[in-house]
Image (cartoon, grey):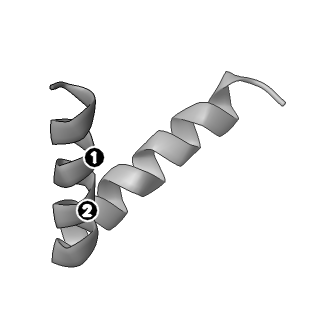
Amino acid sequence: RDHTTAIHACEKITKNINNDSGLNQKIMLIKERLYK
């Protein structure tokens, strides 16, 4: 595949995060753990 597949995946995840507060919370926890 090519870079458009990765771009599509990023856009889809961003949309899901914005529409699902539970998913948004999980992503925030992951980010906090990664950036410690």
> Outermost residue, right direction?
1
Q: Is residue 11 left or right of residue 31?
A: right
The image quarter containing residue 32 is: top left
Q: Which label belongs to residue 20? A: none
Image point (46%, 55%), residue name: 12
Instruction: Say which residue label 1 marks.
Output: 30
Instruction: Say which residue label 2 marks.
Output: 26
The image quarter containing residue 35 is: top left
Marks 1,2: beta carbons within 8 A:
yes
Task: Point out residue 22 in the picture as x, y percentages from the top left corner.
Answer: 21, 76
Q: Type of residue at label 2?
A: Lys
Q: Secondary structure at mark 1?
A: helix
Image point (46%, 41%), residue name: 10
When the figure is inspected, residue 3 is found, relative to residue 31, above or below; the finding is above
Other residues around mark 2 within 10 Å, as few (<14) / some (14–19) / many (≥20): few
Q: Along the line of sight, which residue is nearer the eye, 34 or 7? A: 34
Q: Is residue 28 left or right of residue 27?
A: left
